[in-house]
Amino acid sequence: EAGVAQSPRYKIIEKRQSVAFWCNPISGHATLYWYQQILGQGPKLLIQFQNNGVVDDSQLPKDRFSAERLKGVDSTLKIQPAKLEDSAVYLCASSLGSDTYEQYFGPGTRLTVT
Amino acid sequence: QKEVEQNSGPLSVPEGAIASLNCTYSDRVSQSFFWYRQYSGKSPELIMSIYSNGDKEDGRFTAQLNKASQYVSLLIRDSQPSDSATYLCAPENFVFGPGTRLSVLP
């Protein structure tokens, strides 16, 4: 069974530029999560999708971050414009459904904003 | 703010010893808990889930949950150098603790 796929693995941009990350969850997994992990901290949930609907985006900085999950499979997370403090690893995870919480993480995208 | 607290460590144990990792949480409605292992530069990997009070054993790992005390722990028996990693605790609301860094010394 293929795991969660993410791309790109690394990205370096200048502040005020925009960037997008892509995630493909494990086949059959209805729930998809985006996390931000700053070095030395635990992952912070940004947004949770159930199929193509948003369950929780309370910690998503909506003035600059956006996410979508069209057709309930792949998802993209965008930052526009980026700030220095957005430098982090962006993790995508998926789980089977709304009543199962075991999450499987992708390899992450390491973003550096200069 | 619902919080999860962990001792950031590092926790150092000799090879073959028992490593004990602890986690406390503030959200009383949390019912299930998950332990993830994260190697440096890698993404978190699920190692244990526990849904009810008491102990759950899986190989060298034992998770313990005490909902009355809002406390969950992970014991690693016969610790190996390959267990050296950061261990993250999270309830089902996906609020992760800061993680405890474990170092197993050969």
Image: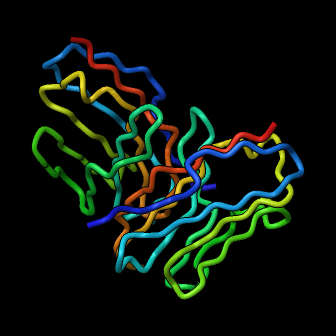
Q: Nearer the viewer, residue A95 or B64?
A: A95
Relative vertical location of residue B91 with respect to residue A10 in this rendering, above or below:
below
Q: Which residue sits at x=60%, y=34%?
A: A39
User: Viewer-proximal residue, B24 or B75?
Assistant: B75
Q: Is residue B58 left or right of residue B10?
A: left
> In the rendered image of this protein, does residue B31 appear above or below residue B83?
below
Q: Residue at x 24, y 57 (%)?
A: B53
Tell me residue B88's x, y (percent). 42, 42
Q: Quadrant of the N terminus of chain A?
A: bottom left
Give the residue furthest to the bottom: A71
Q: Residue at x 52, y 38 (%)?
A: B98
Residue farthest along the right direction in this orientation? A16
Q: Residue B31 appears at what percent x and percent y?
A: 36, 65
In the rendered image, which quarter contains the C terminus of chain A?
A: top right
Residue sitting nearer the eye, B28 or A114: A114
Q: Position of residue B39 (x, y in %)?
A: 39, 35
Q: In the figure, is residue A79 to the left or right of A92? A: right
Residue A75 point in image, percent of width and height: 58, 73
Colour pattern: rainbow
Q: Residue at x 23, y 46 (%)?
A: B63
Relative depth, front residue between A109 and B20: A109
